[in-house]
Image: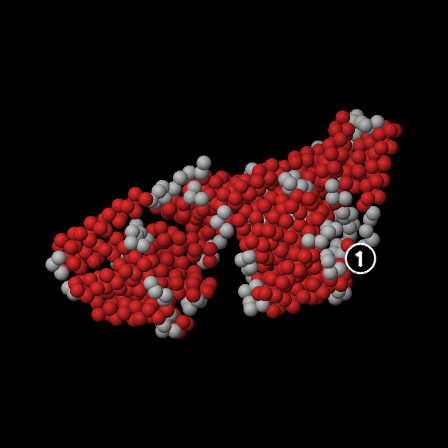
């Protein structure tokens, strides 16, 4: 059940859940535009359906007749071909429609005395056709030509100019030129306001389209203000319970869900259900759509039972009105299945998905609807970590896309993109790269190089390159994606920060901490400018900066972790798991900066809250005790340090499976204290236990074992056995030399 802005953009559902997608502006421009008031979104099930095949046959006959009477280049022939193009478009055949329009435009451009406005109309129709096929490069050229022609006419109506401007905006948006698209759309709105009025249905729908562009640009506050403006206007014109108000409320709820404010979205969704039920009856397909969206919001908010009730009501309506074998029923089953996963009823969820698969395997399905339902089914299997079935049904979705849209259509690319991701998650990186290269070829051909969708594909290729050990290739790809996003958004947009952080990860892996710090500093600057100092995203970036700074400049890292902790405390509270972990990281950073007093104060706070939450015998409690031991030792309070470490050791021996790295850490630190206190015999026993643990975990040739052996050697030296100590040190150095020889540098992508 696609929403107002969901049907055409499914790529985002996997990585960055989005309820907006591409604007439907072109769709309602194709339809008859209401003259005065906005009209309710009545289901097509209630309307008499035209005989598309008969209309197409009549239009083809008209072209044949016109060619006989006026010839191939007659203006009347152009009119007939234009009508045929519209018929092809109505029949879902944009390629055939475009072929007719190429001939129409050739005739009109050569005809003497042909009104310029008619040529502009033809370019508008061509742009609509290309937008419907998502050929945004071609549609942008056609729409730009239409705008230019209309601007050349001194007496051209503002409403017709606005039509062309809106088409140009949609084409620009499809190409990823969002600021330009927003400017064009705003110009179209101004023209419609001047010619039709600020509360005309066309003007209000245009404002909604502008809101969706603002969402893609990340300007959610501006989008919310635009949607609220439409809601107020529609409520004033038609009343607060009119179906047109429900349309705008859906958009408002979408925006709230995008911001993860599902609690606020819920009452908005419930109001939409009530409006649609009152307007059309409780068993109308429009109510099922609203219930499905309500279920999505409830599930995102963690209310599985509420989501299940909403989905079951939608399933009942769709089964009654559409039939048990309809693709929409399959989608309802998929939604219900998603409620079951992560619960004891997982088997029921699997059975529901199998039932949905059976429905979609039937013949005589609407190919477009089937492709969308297969995508939803594959996505559900992926959420359930059933990657084999996810791969199977994404492959079927790709084949359905090819039949419904064509092999080089963006919809095909979307499911190929998801297929690549599922394959990547199974560790088949070369295969994932092959699929992504197919996606990129479609993106560049259909959407253009400087398109956000193209950038997303390039970023995914960068991730796969890193998985394949190709850091240089990953770096180059990310810089390409960065250039595209900068061209679209400018230098101050949250997505810029995301890429800066990923580039910083590469530089850090390559050992270039200075470059990593510079990139993270840019990311922090972008987030401060676009999201503010207390946004959760900046806390994550600050933590990453601290990770890079801590080995070289722990004092600077303390500052970054302090700022991050303040963000988490504000958003999550002092006793949230994330906050407590941030507090512990800050304390460890204070230790690295040789500030044990400050570290101990933080650790005591964290320990008190952690004990309240998890009890005395938890691994988290033990981890804090280990750090407290380090703080005490730095203050020369070895007795306190040993007490804390021994408490931690007892907890780890209960909670951790042997052999345990955490136990090894405690023993190692106790051994160091024993050496300090001139107890080499006790230290030797402790370090020998550490060697045994690390050998069982890592193997005898691991660097960790070499470091342990160095401590064993120190204990032997303290016991007066220098020859044995030298022998053990030599063994440790040999391990380290072999490890250094075996390590290989990361190579570039061939």
Q: Which quadrant does the C terminus fall into?
A: top left
Q: Which quadrant does the N terminus fall into?
A: bottom right
Residue at 81% x, 55% y is: 47
Return the x and y of residue 133 as percentages of the image width and height: 68, 41
Looking at the image, is 258 positioned above or below residue 343?
A: above
The answer to which image quadrant residue 741 occupies is top left
Return the x and y of residue 469 as percentages of the image width and height: 42, 44
Looking at the image, is 550 positioned above or below residue 343?
A: above
Q: How crowded is the residue under tag 1: few (<14 C-alpha within 10 Å), some, or many (20+)?
A: few
- Asked if one can make out residue 294 in the rendered structure from this viewpoint, the answer is no
Task: Write down the residue under mark 1.
Answer: 46
**Front residue of 334 and 260:** 334
In the visual, does 579 lie left or right of 192?
left
**Front residue of 621 and 711:** 711
Residue at 36% x, 44% y is: 510
Return the x and y of residue 474 as percentages of the image width and height: 45, 42
**Front residue of 392 and 129:** 392
Return the x and y of residue 692 as percentages of the image width and height: 28, 60
């Amino acid at each position: 059940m696609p929403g107002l802005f969901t049907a055409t953009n499914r790529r985002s559902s996997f990585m960055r859940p989005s309820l907006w997608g591409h604007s439907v502006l072109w769709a309602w421009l194709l339809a008859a535009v209401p003259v005065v008031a906005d009209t309710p979104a009545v289901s097509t099930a209630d309307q008499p359906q035209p005989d598309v095949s008969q209309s197409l046959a009549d239009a083809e006959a008209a072209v044949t007749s016109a060619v006989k009477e006026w010839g191939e280049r007659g203006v009347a022939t152009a009119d007939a071909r234009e009508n045929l193009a519209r018929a092809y478009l109505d029949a879902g055949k944009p390629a055939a429609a475009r072929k007719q329009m190429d001939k129409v435009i050739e005739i009109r451009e050569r005809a003497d005395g042909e009104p310029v406005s008619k040529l502009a109309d033809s370019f508008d129709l061509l742009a609509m056709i290309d937008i419907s096929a998502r050929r945004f490069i071609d549609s942008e050229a056609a729409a730009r030509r239409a705008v230019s022609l209309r601007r050349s006419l001194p007496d051209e109506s503002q409403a017709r100019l606005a039509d062309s401007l809106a088409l140009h905006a949609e084409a620009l948006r499809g190409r990823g030129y969002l600021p330009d698209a927003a400017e064009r759309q705003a110009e179209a709105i101004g023209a419609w306001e001047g010619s039709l009025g600020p509360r005309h249905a066309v003007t209000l729908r245009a404002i909604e389209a502008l809101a969706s562009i603002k969402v893609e640009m990340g300007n959610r506050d501006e989008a919310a203000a635009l949607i609220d403006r439409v809601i107020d206007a529609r409520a004033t014109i038609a009343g607060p319970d009119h179906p047109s108000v429900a349309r705008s409320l859906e958009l408002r709820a979408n925006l709230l869900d995008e911001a993860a404010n599902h609690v606020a979205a819920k009452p908005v969704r419930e109001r939409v259900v009530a409006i649609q039920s009152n307007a059309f009856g409780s068993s109308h397909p429009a109510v099922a759509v609203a219930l499905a969206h309500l279920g999505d919001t409830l599930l995102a908010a963690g209310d599985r039972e509420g989501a299940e009730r909403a989905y079951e009501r939608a399933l009942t309506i769709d089964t009654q009105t559409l039939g048990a074998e309809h693709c929409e029923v399959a989608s309802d089953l998929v939604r219900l299945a998603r409620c079951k996963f992560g619960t004891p009823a997982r088997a029921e969820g699997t059975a529901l998905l199998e039932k949905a698969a059976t429905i979609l395997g039937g013949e005589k399905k609407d190919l477009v609807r089937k492709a969308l339902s297969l995508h939803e089914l594959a996505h559900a299997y992926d959420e359930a970590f059933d990657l084999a079935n996810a791969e199977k049904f994404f492959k079927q979705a790709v084949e359905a896309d090819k039949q419904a849209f064509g092999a080089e259509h963006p919809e095909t690319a979307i499911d190929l993109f998801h297929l690549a991701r599922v394959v990547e998650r199974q560790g088949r990186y070369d295969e994932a790269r092959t699929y992504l290269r197919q996606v990129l070829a479609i993106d560049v051909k259909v959407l253009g190089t400087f398109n956000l969708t193209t950038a997303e594909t390039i970023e995914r290729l960068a991730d796969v390159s890193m998985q394949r050990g190709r850091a240089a290739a990953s770096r180059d790809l990310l810089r390409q994606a960065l250039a595209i996003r900068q061209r679209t958004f400018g230098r101050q947009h949250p997505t810029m920060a995301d890429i800066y952080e990923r580039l910083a990860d590469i530089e850090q892996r390559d050992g270039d901490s200075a470059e990593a710090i510079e990139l993270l500093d840019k990311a922090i600057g972008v987030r401060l400018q676009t999201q503010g100092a207390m946004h959760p995203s900046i806390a994550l970036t600050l933590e990453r900066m601290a990770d890079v700074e801590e080995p070289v400049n722990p004092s600077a890292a303390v500052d970054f972790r302090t700022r991050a902790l303040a963000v988490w405390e504000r958003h999550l509270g002092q006793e949230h798991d994330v906050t407590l972990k941030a507090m512990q990281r800050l304390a460890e950073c204070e230790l690295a900066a040789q500030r044990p007093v400050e570290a101990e104060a933080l650790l005591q706070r964290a320990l008190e809250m952690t004990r309240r939450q998890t009890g005395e015998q938890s691994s988290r409690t033990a981890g804090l005790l280990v750090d407290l031991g380090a703080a005490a030792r730095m203050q020369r309070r070895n007795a306190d340090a040993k007490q804390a470490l021994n408490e931690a050791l007892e907890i780890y021996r209960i909670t951790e499976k042997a052999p345990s790295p955490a136990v090894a850490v405690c023993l190692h630190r106790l051994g160091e204290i024993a050496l300090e206190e001139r107890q080499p015999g006790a230290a030797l026993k402790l370090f020998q236990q550490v060697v045994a643990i690390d050998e069982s975990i890592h193997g005898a040739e691991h660097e960790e074992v070499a470091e342990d052996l160095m401590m064993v050697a120190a204990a032997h030296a303290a016991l007066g056995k220098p020859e044995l100590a030298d022998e053990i040190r030599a063994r440790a150095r040999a391990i380290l030399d072999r490890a250094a020889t075996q390590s290989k540098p990361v190579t570039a992508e061939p």
